[in-house]
Amino acid sequence: MSAAGARTFHTSPAFLVRSADMGEADRRLSFFTRDAGVVATVGKSAWRSRKRFGGTLQRYVLLDVSWTESPGKLAVLSAASISESFWPVVEDWDKVRHADYLLEIAAELFPQAGPKPKAFGILLDGFRALSAGEAPGQTARRVEAGFLAVGGWGPDLSGCRRCGKTDCRWYRFVPSEGGVLCDSCPPSGGGRLSLGSVKTWRALQTGNRAAMWRLRIPEPITLELQVVIPGYIEYCLGKATRSLGGEALRI
């Protein structure tokens, strides 16, 4: 066991979430890692040290990063290398916007320190899907639903939360109810979802990653979910997301 106050060394697959200048040469770098969750580090002379970092400190790539931690101090990034590249994402502005969104909600929904293998796996699947050519909106809905389920925020989509009806053609998703309501039950309002959209969302949050990515999502259902799920994520976070220009519907 290491002595109290000693430095500890860590390594993990990671995505770079955000970066900012610290002085003339250093950078503050925040990563979403598989083995430690969100990790904030300082990259000493990040723009000058080609030997340590080269051109690896960029978004939209899967990294292997190493860092050291000392009590009471910001962790120091010691090494980074590219494990997998997603260049088709960089070449398409809409994919870039959605990739930024996925990175943002990963870090916001899972800010606690500690291993996040399930959430990290879903995020990695999302980047691979974007790179392989899936429509960005479909990828985002899959990742959102997966994150919500893993984090314990998955809504009850078995039927109307008040009366239990399961055969309505249309429902209303009401965040404060934690699920859907039929048109007959109070309260009013909420985002409208067809039965097909409710079933699709329910299938996406089963926890089976392979099945989640095999599921075909028709475009009309993607569009319905697009105006409901992002708003629910903001409800869970208690604040608006910055990415995608505030496309979430306030429900």
Image (cartoon, rainbow, N blue to C red):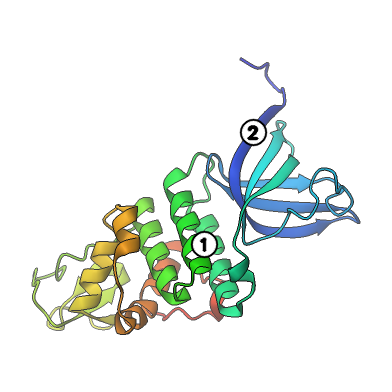
| Total numbered labels placed on residues in the image | 2
Quadrant that contains the C terminus: bottom left
Which residue is the site of mark 2? 10
Label whose residue precedes the other's in the sequence (2 or 1): 2
Residue type, numbered disc 1: Phe
Residue depicted at x 43% and y 55%: 122
SS state under label 1: helix
SS state under label 2: strand
Residue 177, visible in the rendered structure: no
Residue 64 quadrant: top right
Question: Could you give the CA–CA distance between mark 2 and mark 1, rounded to whole angstroms?
Answer: 24 Å
Residue type, numbered disc 2: His
Nearer to us in this view, 105 or 62: 62
Which residue is the site of mark 1? 127
Residue depicted at x 14% and y 69%: 159
Nearer to us in this view, 104 or 5: 104
Nearer to us in this view, 217 or 144: 217
Q: Is residue 24 left or right of residue 123?
A: right
Residue 166 location (% of width, % of height): 9, 71
